[in-house]
Amino acid sequence: MTYTDDVDLSSKLEAWENFYNYDRPHMSHQGKTPYEVMRSLLK
């Protein structure tokens, strides 16, 4: 990952974290995202 300054780095890390937690399926969660697992546990 390349970045130009601290603000750019922060923005890119936030985007990656959102992708990782809300969009990317995880094998350890049977193909669900961490967010989907959390929501199902809170019901």
Image: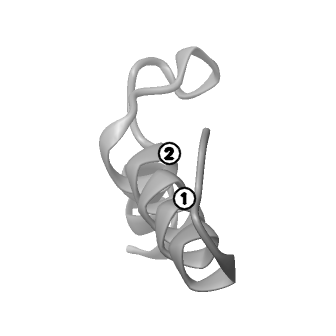
| Residue 26 higher or lower than 42, as above or below | above
Report, in whole angstroms, how far the alpha carbon at label 2 lies from the one at label 1. 5 Å
Q: Nearer the viewer, residue 30 or 10?
A: 10
Residue 24 occupies which quadrant of the picture?
A: top left
Label 2, residues with CA under 10 Å away: few <14, some 14-19, many ≥20: some
In the image, is 14 to the left or to the right of 23? Answer: right
Outermost residue toward the left? 23
Q: Nearer the viewer, residue 12 or 30?
A: 12
- What is the number of the mark on residue 17? 1
Q: Are marks 2 and 1 in contact (CB under 8 Å)?
A: yes
Q: Residue 22: where, in percent of width, then height?
A: 36, 54
Q: Residue 26: where, in percent of width, then height?
A: 52, 25
The residue positioned 55% from the left and 15% from the top of the image is 27
Q: Residue 33: where, in percent of width, then height?
A: 42, 41
Q: Residue 43: where, in percent of width, then height?
A: 38, 74
Q: Is residue 34 visible?
A: no
Q: Is residue 2 visible?
A: yes
Label 2 SS = helix
In the image, is 23 to the left or to the right of 3? Answer: left
Q: Which residue is mark 2?
A: 20
Residue 13 occupies which quadrant of the picture?
A: bottom right
Question: Residue type at mark 2?
Answer: Tyr
Q: Nearer the viewer, residue 5 or 12?
A: 5
Question: Residue type at mark 1?
Answer: Glu
